[in-house]
Image (cartoon, helix red, strand yellow):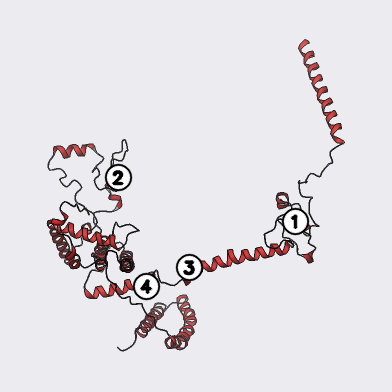
Amino acid sequence: MGEGLVEQRQADDKASWDAYWKVRDIDSRGSIYPRFRYYAHKAFDAPATWFRETIVQPLNNKNRLPYYHRQLTRVPEIDECGVNDKACFYEANEQYRLDKMVDGFILQTLRQRVDRCMLYNNPDHSPCAKVIEDMEENELNFFMKYGELGGESDVRDAYMKQKHRMIWERRHPEIMDERAAKLADHKARLANGEFDYSFWKKGMFYQDKKNYEPPYEFQMSKSALEGDKPLSKDWEYYKKVSQDPEFDKDQGKKSDFRLF
Amino acid sequence: MLPQLSRLQTSASIRSLGFRRLASSHSHSDAKVERKPDNYRPGTDSYAYENPWPKLNGGRLDWLFGDGWRRPLAKDQGAKMRREWIWFSQIAHDEHKDWARFHQAAFLLFTVLTTWFTCWIMFARPDWPMGREWALREAHLEIARREKAGLPLISPDLIPRDRVAATLPSDEELRDFDVLI
């Protein structure tokens, strides 16, 4: 429409406030106290709005200074640096630090989207399937790129992590093929409107199997952070598992957690 | 009759002994000790000069610190150099000037400078070389760019895969090197 972004935003803002006052006007018709309250609020709002729209905004639009977002030139990555080239390593590490911060803020933005969507659509979170999918996928990508390196890692550690991962993928093509097939199946079901949250995370904290220790002689058999924990506190469960081949064939290997 | 008589004699002798001892000690100590009022506190009668705040006399601070807690007087207020004065290493010949200069310096350093430095760190520090504000804006711009290009918002690869694959060692070179991820 030829206007600038500032003019568009101001027009949208004015339209929103006009709609608000129209609702107040229609809502308070035929009543006594709400109508007088509307008049009182309007009496305060009208001169302030007039002053802002006729005096303040033209001055601000005339004197507005532009804001420039700094464009950083990309420097050679760590794979193009010489082994003893400390200047090249320093530049690559600074670039890695900024890229990691940008990715962290991207992930933070995605998490905020999920939080706002779940808060807005409480208790039915099914409209949030897309934003949850985006957040989980990019959180996994962030972990694959930067995860478990520690606070003192530099760009060489991240580079070695990627190299090791690619070597592992080369050595296990069958696992990578199965993961790709499962991901494609998950995406197809998501497109059909079926969102399976357990594809990303198998459960929540309160479903962690670390709480499945027997109530007697409480001595932790393994670290609570590991995944291999007892399935049940009931000895009869294990007896039935050993005697009945058809009883509980999954044995905790599948998750039935439903987000919605 | 006999037990009652013995008990009476014993109590009488003890009573006379006590009286005699008390009488001798009391009469003996009277000649040496000067009596003090019942609200007397040791050390509260050793002012170096006449106290200009009489209403504050006899308080807890006087009882604890004597007159050391009071603000020193200026010369025109009738100040004299106190024998108990411990100086602030500023001016050795004037107690009030010494006190005033030290407290002025302490206010400038501890209050004004600390507040300004805190506010500078919180509000006025430039973004670089940390780049945190830049990264936050760049994150939103990057989201818009990647959504338009159809790429994942966060790439799992630090360096493009083809460039890394070109330099990966072969299986013959790695031999039995175990890769755990």
4 or 3: tag closer to the N-terminus: 3
Residue visible at 15% across and 38% down in the picture: A242
Amino acid bearing label 3: Ile
Q: Chain of mark 1?
A: B
Q: Which residue is nearer to you in this view: A190 or B58?
A: B58
Place of residue A254 in the rendered image (x, y in percent of width and height, measured from the top left): 19, 51
Residue B67, horizontal then vertical, whole percent: 74, 54
> Is residue A80 positioned above or below A204 on the image?
below
Is B33 located above or below residue A5 in the figure?
Answer: above
Q: Quadrant of residue A138?
A: bottom left
- Give the foreground label among 4 and 2: 4
What distance separates the C-alpha of mark 1 from that of mark 2? 66 Å
The quadrant of the picture occupied by the N terminus of chain A is bottom left
Q: Residue furthest front?
A: A84
Q: Which residue is mark 1?
A: B56
Q: Which residue is mark 4?
A: B134
